[in-house]
Amino acid sequence: MAEQVPTVIVNPEDYREVLQKLNDIEEKIEFTNSEISQRYGKKIGRDIGILYGVCTALMVVLVYLLLILSPVMEKLQSFLQSVLFK
């Protein structure tokens, strides 16, 4: 016995309405997914920006301290040697 595909007769206007409702639902789902992705992207971007800011600030402070302490370093080294290795 061969299987037969059931046939249904539908009013074309009802069919168009159902398709329009499905399209509206699909648009809402796509919009919601895009909003969620955009928020996630903003959070990731903020976190990366904070990390870049911290790294830049640490490098600036390190360079500043090296430039400020370089003239004092010789005096500090001689002082520590005289105190520790007397």
Image: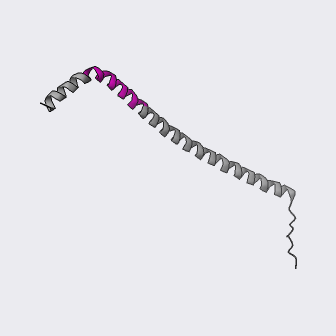
Front residue of this view, candidates 76 and 65: 76
Residue 6 shown in magenta = no
Question: Which quarter shows the N terminus?
Answer: bottom right
Q: Is residue 65 above or below residue 48?
A: above
Front residue of this view, candidates 82 and 37: 82
Which residue corresponds to the image point at 33% horizontal and 25% vertical from the top-left? Answer: 66
Q: What span is colored magenta in the figure? A: 56-72
Is residue 21 rendered to the left or right of residue 69? right
Front residue of this view, candidates 71 and 28: 71
Q: How is the image coloured?
A: one colour
Question: Which residue extends farthest left?
Answer: 86
Magenta: main secondary structure: helix
Q: Is residue 71 above or below residue 11?
A: above
Counting from the top left corner in percent of width and height, residue 25 is at: 70, 52
Question: Which quarter shows the C terminus?
Answer: top left
Is residue 52 rendered to the left or right of residue 76? right
Residue 68 shown in magenta = yes
Which residue corresponds to the image point at 21% horizontal and 22% vertical from the top-left? Answer: 75
Q: Is residue 77 above or below residue 24?
A: above
Asked which quadrant contains residue 63, the reply is top left
Which residue corresponds to the image point at 43% horizontal and 30% vertical from the top-left? Answer: 56
Counting from the top left corner in percent of width and height, residue 49 is at: 48, 35
Asked which quadrant contains residue 6, the reply is bottom right
Which residue corresponds to the image point at 30% horizontal and 22% vertical from the top-left? Answer: 70
Q: How many marks?
A: 0
Is residue 11 rendered to the left or right of residue 80? right
